[in-house]
Amino acid sequence: MSRLMILFLAFFLSACERVNQETPARPERPARIVSLDYCADQYVLKLVDRDRILALSPDAGREFSYMRAAAAGVPTVRPNAEDVLILKPDLVVRSYGGGPNAAAFFEKAGVPVVDIGWTPDIPSVMENTQRIADALGESERGAAVNEDMQERLAHLKKRSTGETALYMTPAGVTTGPGSLIHEMIVAAGLTNMEDQYGWRSLPLETLAYEKPDVVAAAFFGSRTNHPDAWSPMKHPVAKAQLTQSEVVSLEGAWTSCSGWFLMDAIEALAGGETQ
Amino acid sequence: MTDLSVENLTLCAGATTLVESASFKLAQGEFVALLGPNGAGKTSLIRAGIGLQSADDGRSLLDGEPVHSLSPAQRARQIAYLPQIRPLAWPNAVRDVVSLGRFSHGAPLGHLKGLDAEAVDRALEACGLTDLASRRTDTLSGGELARVHCARAFAAEAPLLVADEPIAALDPRQQFRILDLIRAYVDQGGGALVVLHDIQLAARYASRLIWMKEGRIVADGPPAETLTAERLKDIYGVTARVDGAHIHIEGAA
Amino acid sequence: MTRESLLMPVLIGASVLAIIAACFLGSTALPADRLLAALFGGADAGDRLVVWQIRLPRAISAYIVGAALGISGAALQGLLRNPLAEPGVLGVSASASLMATFALYYGIASITPWAVPLAAIIGALAATALITLAALRTQSVVTLILIGVGLSSFAGAAMSLLMNLAPNPFSLSDMINWMLGSVANRSFDEITLAAPFILAGGAILFATRRGLSALTLGEEAASGIGLDLQRQRIFTVVGAGLATGGAVALAGAIGFVGIVAPHLIRPFVGHDPARSLAPSALLSGLILVVADIFVRLLPTSAELKLGVVAALIGAPAFVWIAMQRRGGND
């Protein structure tokens, strides 16, 4: 029994060994950049020249990737540690790719990581863009993207008559205050019909009583074949909204990640007119 | 008059021959006992004879029609069958089990009326089950259960009855009761073919004995003619003395 | 028996009450007077829309799915002579789910919406036929249930595989709904697709119920009293397959529902399988509507799946019945 105890203690102590906690230094101008998911792909493709991109995520060319045209011909890598580390990158950019422990893992392996981060509103999107551009060594380009966004916002002809809008997807999900989608609706001058906080299922019963003036319909083009057998969107009351209200089609690529491209969505919601 | 005529029936299971060229007749008004040691093929003969199993050769005619050309319901209206193994899947009431005897008449079970209800009542009375009619079958003794199954067979009021070991594992009194019921049935015009192991009882009740050995019918006739000491030695391998209708079995041969 | 003659009227009355009670629940507060007005005439368009298009279809879906599983369960129990037989336990529901997801995720459903219930029925029929064939070879109920467990597991695994390989992206919540069952967001569109099959299956089972009573005596004697065994097996399999397939197409695979109701009904109908069919259907429908009410009342963050509540009630009942059996027909 005591020999077993000694064995246990030995294992226990070895597991308690403290790990080197230093974060690796980021290069000023990284030249071997790998991005782990399609949200990170957008920033990398927008801000960095192709010769400095080592690899993108496999989703870079998919229809929900805004910069898919620019992704053509760029090599891709599956976002697991083994495949990425073999390429010997000097910077990894990610939002969700590689799993929740990816940042800690890559840094332990000596590769610095840039996290895209959470952006609850439009100002934070712009701050984020600048931060990422700085990390990529392209501060000027980041500033240019933000300037463009500011200009478009300034010239936006908002809807001013207090119309209501509801965000609808084939999966039957909508959102109230607390999400970037909500901020986009507000920026376009509309009132979000869903007033309860956070992401939720379409409010079918509310739709029986009142209809939104504008339906912000996202992902309908790309996922028309999506089965989703229990989606509230299949219910006749929800389907009726697509024929009885004004429908603004939003491309999935505009809303599936946070970034400067949400301006396309805001402009579409506002009616597409600019001053 | 309904009659069952089995001609040269042969039944094989793989390489084993269960029944070979067996022929017999069963008519109304007869009490026929089918005797033979275990494994002689009695059950197989019965099952093939009434059409529950297909024979490999020979034929079986019910009122001149091949048994297999009849639907199960048509056949059931002519022959009431009491098998050797009698499971009861659910603990129904006695009356409900007996009512199943009217199944082939298209009766809506549970709401029997008219002729069907009367037949069930008659069967219950004949078997002494009127007091037990509402009891659940899982609360009955072996003897009572045997009577329930008999009542089920009688409720069909079919012209012929084929019973496979109806009195096995019963005490002597119950055995006599059941055989008395069958004899009453024959006296009222039915025809019964009963598989028995008790040769004494068979000789006492049956008007005809059919003896089987190793798949063949070796004798078919009244007890007076077919029941002899030699026969007992030949079929069962026992030494015995036969004294009229009394048999004294002395031991294994 | 006065108990038996009261059974059907009581069940019908309770079912109607339960469905109306289910209509009280929803995201908008609807007081009783407006609800009744919407049901029976009067009331404005919004109220009528909420009650007739949103709440009532959900309640009715739960009811007919329960009824389908209840009558299939009672019929399978009669055929297999075992109180533990049930579409969920025997893997029939899971197989139906598997075929339905196949039709849905591989684009067959885009050819015609009937593809989903038809595929579910094919899956259910295949599984029921398999179980019946197995029942011919073995008398042991334990073996049958093990085969059912095997079928369920296989169907679940195959469903995961198919969903992963599907050309269209899938959602995990959809898969969970297929495997655990839900009547959320059901409209009369889906009911119209499933109801004909449920009604046809139920009608076939009801019309051939007499033979199930005959099987009380065992197959040998049942054949002796005039039952055409092959015909009975085929009709029961087809009926149970149609009803279960339709139910799964509507609400996914819900298990154990078909065990509780027949077990409760049996003492009232003298343990006669034939007489247990209709009351079992009604009671199972009632149970599922009440379960759906619970699903919406329980203060959980995400709505519980109907199959979860059904299993919470039905699985203990399953274990209890299994322990009660005196090993008679095992």
Image (cartoon, grey):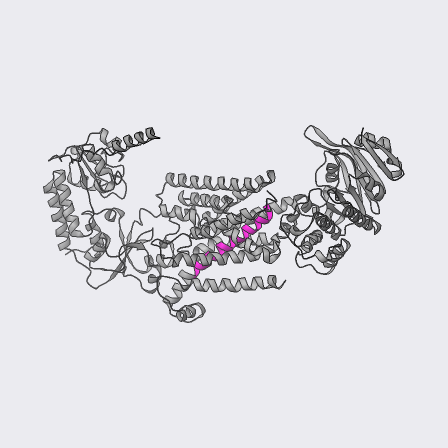
Give the farthest residue toward the front: A2
Residue pictured at 86% horizontal, 36% vertical: B227
Q: Which of the pair B95/C17 is nearer the observer? A: B95
Q: Is residue C96 magenta?
A: no
The percent coordinates of residue C330 (x first, y second) are: 59, 42
Q: Which of the pair B69/B174 is nearer the observer? A: B174
| Number of numbered callouts drawn | 0
Q: Is residue B222 visible?
A: no
Query: Is C102 rendered above or below residue C291?
Result: above
Residue A232 falls left or right of residue A96: right
The percent coordinates of residue C126 (x first, y second) are: 52, 42
The percent coordinates of residue C208 (x first, y second) are: 61, 52
The percent coordinates of residue B137 (x first, y second) are: 66, 51
Q: Which residues are magenta?
A: C56-80
Which quarter of the image is occupied by the N terminus of chain C?
bottom right
Q: Which of the pair A174/C83 is nearer the observer? A: C83
Residue pictured at 72% horizontal, 36% vertical: B55
- What is the quadrant of residue A41 in the picture? top left
Query: Is A167 rendered above or below residue C147?
Result: below
Give the farthest residue toward the left: A140
Q: Is residue C62 magenta?
A: yes
- What is the quadrant of residue C26 in the picture? bottom left
Query: Is A230 rendered above or below residue C46?
Result: above
Residue A194 falls left or right of residue B87: left
Residue pictured at 74% horizontal, 53% vertical: B155
Q: Main secondary structure of the magenta part?
A: helix
Q: Which of the pair C37/C152 is nearer the observer? A: C152
Residue B148 falls left or right of residue C233: right
Q: Is residue B34 visible?
A: yes
